Image (cartoon, coloured by chain):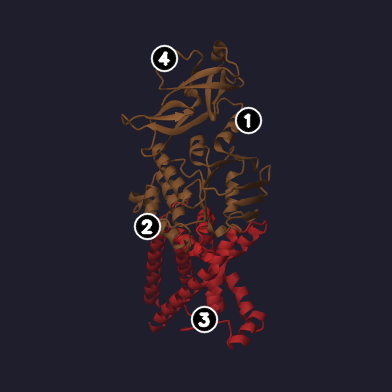
Chain colours: A red, B brown
């Protein structure tokens, strides 16, 4: 049971860190993509969306190769931090960030492309700088898209299995997340513990989706851009 | 202020507008749709990154961060209330300005006091335009560009706001106003810029520019309007009409702001009746003796006759048959009758 508590804690930590990192990465990326007009744009969008359709084991396999100490990313990590990237929590975070990238980018990209940029021009005529325009106009107007991006990333990370198993293995307290602990219980015939984790995940996912729909449909605060 | 703006556009012409405005308070900018008026404003406000601008404003280059603009659409930020929109503009206002406008006076001048707690989605088109105007003024720009700012506002409120705006402009905030409303341009602007195909083709007093526009347009469907004005001769004796003098002739208007020493009367060409006799009484309130200056070409059976007395100009759109019946010729003296 204590292993399960550890797995829950580790999963929440992984999901929170992934969501925060992705929000920091995905916001400027989605903004840039929404402004960028180039014939290669579809290719870039496809690359970002790849994790949506790729089997997680494919991504996990290539990430495992990249994290191995004999590959240059894995070697660089070992030289700088002195630890192996494969089968570590840091490796899990990096893997989760790559795996959940489209879940953060897509909602923000949609929000930014639907935003009426003339509101920013109004801000510019007030003498507002770019950061002020973003924080006082873009963020509040795209608030629901930020909530969806954050919620989807968090939920998706919590439900990760294939990628985590490939690059993190099943080390209790280090890389064992809820989905893997559940798999472990089933393998060992511990159905009651498996039920607790499975039902808990189902309830959590349901509540999170309710919250996301509430945020996305407005909850009474859905702005019309035009 | 002087400016020269070049902006490549996706349409058939390049914006290439140059003007020199000396000691102006409110200047009008008009021209056909697609002439480049809004593009010129956007370039002056620094919203067109491809624009090449050379400008001089108050002994220096125009600071594009201090150019305010009221867009054709109000563009009120939907996540803020009216008060929130106004506060945002106030937060980023310039710390110094030659003329300090009291915030409350601005809100009152734009008739927005009762709207403060409302959400932008709960405003009518005219109310939203008034808030957008107040918001731009509260930001305390050094130059204000108004792109048809009151097109959705009702006539009487618009007249009140335009008169107040003219006062604000005269107190030290120069404004350029885009409008297709001949009355507004004639009444409130010191001078008028006419823009065609991306260039400013004429800059003169409003009556001359408007007359030139009418001369260019052979289409009688263009509703000609003239403004007659002059000093008030008699006050509101019966709270309805004001008598004023225009080119030594008495005229009456029922739309005169109390206390204003000058009265104006907007006369639409299709409301003017002309006759050569001048003796037969008519039911129309104003009679104005004038001279036929030009007779336009017939269009859809109608002809627009241009009339003049001194510097006052008037138009009458009448049927081609009436021109023939009256034997109208250039130089004839006629009586123009029209409502107050």
Point out the image quarter for the C terminus of chain B. top left
CB-based contact (under 8 Å), mark 3 and mark 1 = no
User: Given this view, does label 3 or label 1 mark the residue nearer the observer?
Assistant: 1
Q: Which residue is mark 4?
A: B281
On whether disc 3 and disc 1 are found on a single subunit, the reply is no
Q: Position of residue A178 (x, y in %)?
A: 44, 75
Closer-to-camera residue (A185/A201): A201
CB-based contact (under 8 Å), mark 1 and mark 2 = no
Q: Residues within 10 Å of mark 2 (few under 14, many from 20)?
A: few
Tell me: residue A60, above or below residue B266.
Answer: below
Q: Which residue is mark 3?
A: A89
**Chain letter belonging to callout 4:** B
Q: Residues within 10 Å of mark 4 (few under 14, many from 20)?
A: few
Q: Which residue is mark 1?
A: B216
Secondary element under disc 4, as helix, strand or loop, is loop
CB-based contact (under 8 Å), mark 3 and mark 2 = no
How far apart are the alpha carbons under marks 3 and 1? Answer: 78 Å
Q: Which residue is mark 2?
A: A219
How far apart are the alpha carbons under marks 1 and 4? Answer: 35 Å
How far apart are the alpha carbons under marks 4 and 3? Answer: 100 Å
Q: Let me know if residue A15 appears in the view.
A: yes
Q: Let me know if residue A110 appears in the view.
A: no
Secondary element under disc 1, as helix, strand or loop, is helix
Q: Residues within 10 Å of mark 3 (few under 14, many from 20)?
A: many
Q: Position of residue B317 (x, y in %)?
A: 53, 22
User: Given this view, does label 1 or label 4 mark the residue nearer the observer?
Assistant: 4
Upstream in the sequence, badge 3 or badge 2?
A: 3
Res. B307 image quadrant: top right
**Is residue B225 toward the left or the right of residue B281 in the image?**
right
């Amino acid at each position: 049971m204590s292993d399960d508590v550890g797995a829950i804690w580790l999963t929440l930590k992984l999901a929170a860190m992934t969501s925060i990192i992705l929000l920091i990465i995905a916001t400027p990326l989605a903004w840039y993509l929404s402004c960028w007009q180039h014939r290669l744009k579809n290719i870039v969008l496809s690359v970002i969306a790849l994790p949506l359709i790729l089997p997680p084991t494919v991504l996990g396999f290539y990430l495992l190769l990249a994290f191995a100490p004999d590959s240059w990313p894995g070697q660089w990590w070992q030289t700088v931090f002195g630890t192996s990237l494969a089968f570590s929590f840091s490796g899990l975070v990096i893997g989760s960030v790559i795996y959940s990238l489209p879940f953060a980018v897509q909602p923000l990209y949609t929000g930014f492309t639907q935003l009426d940029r003339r509101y920013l021009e109004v801000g510019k005529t007030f003498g507002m700088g770019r950061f002020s325009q973003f924080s006082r106009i873009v963020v509040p107007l795209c608030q629901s898209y930020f909530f969806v991006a954050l919620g989807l990333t968090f939920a998706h990370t919590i439900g990760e299995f294939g990628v985590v198993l490939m690059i993190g293995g099943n080390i209790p307290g280090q890389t064992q997340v809820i989905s893997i602990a559940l798999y472990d219980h089933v393998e060992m015939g511990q159905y009651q513990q498996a039920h607790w984790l499975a039902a808990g995940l189902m309830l959590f996912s349901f509540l999170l989706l309710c919250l996301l729909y509430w945020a996305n449909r407005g909850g009474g605060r859905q702005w019309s851009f035009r | 202020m002087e400016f020269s703006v070049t902006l490549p556009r996706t349409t058939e012409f390049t914006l290439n507008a140059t003007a020199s405005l000396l000691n102006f308070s409110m200047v009008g900018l008009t021209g056909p749709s697609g002439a480049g008026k809004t593009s010129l404003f956007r370039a002056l406000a620094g919203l067109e990154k491809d624009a090449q601008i050379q400008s001089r404003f108050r002994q220096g280059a125009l600071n594009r961060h201090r150019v305010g603009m009221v867009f054709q659409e109000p563009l009120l930020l939907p996540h803020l209330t009216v008060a929130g929109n106004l506060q945002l503009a106030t937060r980023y206002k310039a710390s110094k300005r030659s003329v300090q406008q009291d915030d409350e006076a601005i809100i009152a001048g734009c008739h927005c006091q009762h709207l403060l707690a409302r959400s932008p989605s709960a405003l009518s088109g005219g109310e939203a335009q008034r808030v957008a105007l107040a918001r731009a003024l509260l930001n305390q720009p050094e130059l204000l560009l108004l792109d048809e700012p009151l097109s959705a506002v009702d006539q009487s409120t618009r007249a009140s706001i335009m008169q107040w705006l003219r006062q604000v402009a005269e107190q030290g905030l120069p404004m350029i106003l885009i409008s297709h409303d001949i009355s507004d341009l004639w009444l409130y602007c010191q001078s008028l810029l006419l823009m065609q195909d991306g260039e400013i083709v004429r800059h003169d007093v409003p009556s001359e520019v408007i007359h030139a526009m009418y001369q260019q347009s052979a289409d009688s469907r263009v509703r000609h309007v003239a403004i007659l004005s002059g000093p008030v001769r008699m006050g509101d004796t019966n709270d309805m009409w004001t008598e004023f003098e225009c080119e030594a002739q008495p005229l009456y208007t029922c739309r005169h702001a109390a206390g204003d020493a000058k009265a104006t009367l907007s006369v639409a060409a299709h409301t003017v009746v002309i006759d050569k006799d001048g003796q037969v009484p008519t039911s129309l309130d104003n009679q104005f003796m004038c001279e036929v200056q030009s007779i336009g070409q017939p269009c859809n059976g109608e002809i627009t006759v241009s009339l003049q007395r001194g510097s006052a100009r008037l138009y009458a759109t009448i049927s081609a048959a009436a021109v023939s019946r009256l034997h109208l010729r250039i130089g004839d003296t006629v009586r123009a009758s029209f409502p107050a």
